[in-house]
Amino acid sequence: MKLPSYVDSSHVAVMSQAIDPNATLDSHAVFGIRMRSSPQALMEAVLWMVGLAAVGSADPTLPSAIDLCLFKAVGLPGCPGCGLGHAMGYLFRGEWLLAVQTHWFSPVVLGILITRITSLLRHAFSERSLP
């Protein structure tokens, strides 16, 4: 393809590399911070952190204002997730025994979420790809 005289061929090569979806060093800027990978990892990490902050700041001794339990809505007894939000609230307050009594899986869920958040943040600010 013949290029017009005002277009330098080196610029075309650079532009074609920038558009290449397989480029590994494609940089993005989010809030003025340069990132090496896509900003989706940062957005997911922020959403998980906001969710944990909301659950952690809620008072676990109060009854739930919103009941999102699908098992209760359908009429099935014994939901495996019921009490997890209250247990997470107890964990954020340092009441580990109450948290485990409310939902025995809560420390494991907190560990999984913290691991996921750190993995996403590492991915957002490094050149590694997420597994």
Image: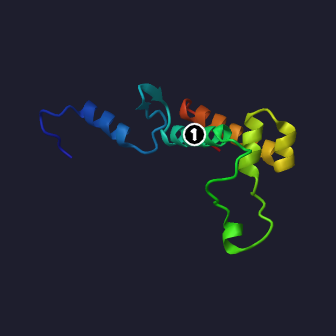
- Is residue 104 in view from this perspective? no
Who is closer to the viewer here, 48 or 39? 48
Name the outermost residue toward the left.
Answer: 5
Density class for disc 1 (Cα within 10 Å; few <14, some 14-19, many ≥20) is few
Give me the residue at 67% from left, 53% from top.
64
Who is closer to the viewer here, 66 or 92? 66
Q: Quadrant of residue 110?
A: top right
Q: How is the image coloured?
A: rainbow
Who is closer to the viewer here, 40 or 5? 40
The total number of labels drawn is 1
Give me the residue at 30% from left, 37% from top.
15
- State which quarter of the image contains the C terminus: top right
| Residue 80 horizontal side relative to residue 125, left or right | right
SS class, disc 1: helix
Residue 31 is situated, as x and y percent measured from the top left of the image, at: 42, 29
Please determine whether, in this image, residue 65 is positioned above or below residue 129.
below
- Is residue 37 in view from this perspective? yes
Q: Quadrant of residue 18?
A: top left
| Residue 59 horizontal side relative to residue 97, left or right | left
Amino acid tagged 1: Val
Who is closer to the viewer here, 27 or 89? 89
Residue 87 is situated, as x and y percent measured from the top left of the image, at: 77, 45
Name the outermost residue toward the front.
Answer: 62
Residue 123 is situated, as x and y percent measured from the top left of the image, at: 58, 35
Q: Which residue is mark 1?
A: 50
Give me the residue at 48% from left, 30% from top.
35
| Residue 25 horizontal side relative to residue 3, left or right | right
| Residue 22 horizontal side relative to residue 88, left or right | left
